[in-house]
Amino acid sequence: MGFTEIFAATHDGALKRAGILDDGGSPSGPGLRIPGVSDFEIEQLGDLAGAAVHAGGADYELAMVDVASDSLLGVPPAMVRALADLLSYETEGEGNVLDEVAEKWAAQDDMPFGADEARKYVQQLAELASGIDDADRTGLYVWSS
């Protein structure tokens, strides 16, 4: 079964990390490895996060970033913002928006894990997204096997 790895890096750093992953290696540095999901499920999560923070309808489609690697995709800025917003978004009522997104994501067809595990992944991904800084020329990248 394959996995998807999500990480923050500069463009060059992302290409280097993708090369290591393409060769079956384990790169150093922080990243979130999610077994059993593909880039499609990450896009689904982006759509759910966008809707949850009232930013639905934006472009949440992952895009190829370089012809050097067809397994490396870039996360669009709208999705990065929506994911980061899950950490601080306040809703009316008593619901936790991050928990709601995780539950909805886990309920998608063919998801290999339940809501508790999904919550851990969504929390970690939101934290990764919140660390993206345009001034550092970093972005969020998805590598999928």
Image (cartoon, rainbow, N blue to C red):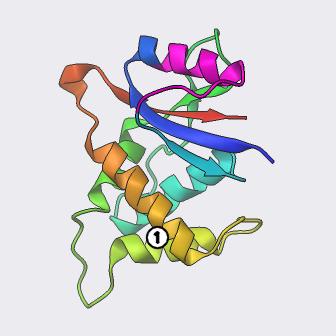
Q: Is residue 129 visible?
A: yes
What segment carries the magenta color? Answer: 14-29
Which residue is situated farthest in the left direction here? 135
| Residue shown at 46% from the left, 54% from the top | 57
Residue 32 placement (x, y as % from top left): 49, 45
Residue 47's spot in the image, x, y percent? 51, 57
Left or right, 28 with respect to 71, comes to left
Q: Residue at x 24, y 67 (%)?
A: 89
Q: Quadrant of residue 113?
A: bottom right
Where is residue 95 shown, x and y percent of the image?
33, 85
Quarter in which the C terminus is drawn = top right
Query: Residue drawn 59% across and 28% down?
Result: 26
Q: Is residue 5 magenta?
A: no
Nearer-the-camera pick, 54 or 141: 141
Say few, some or many: other residues with alpha carbon within 10 Å of mark 1 (under 14 / 14 to 19 / 20 or more): many
Residue 94 drawn above or below residue 3:
below
**51 in relation to 5, above or below:** below
Q: Which of 115/28 is in front? A: 28
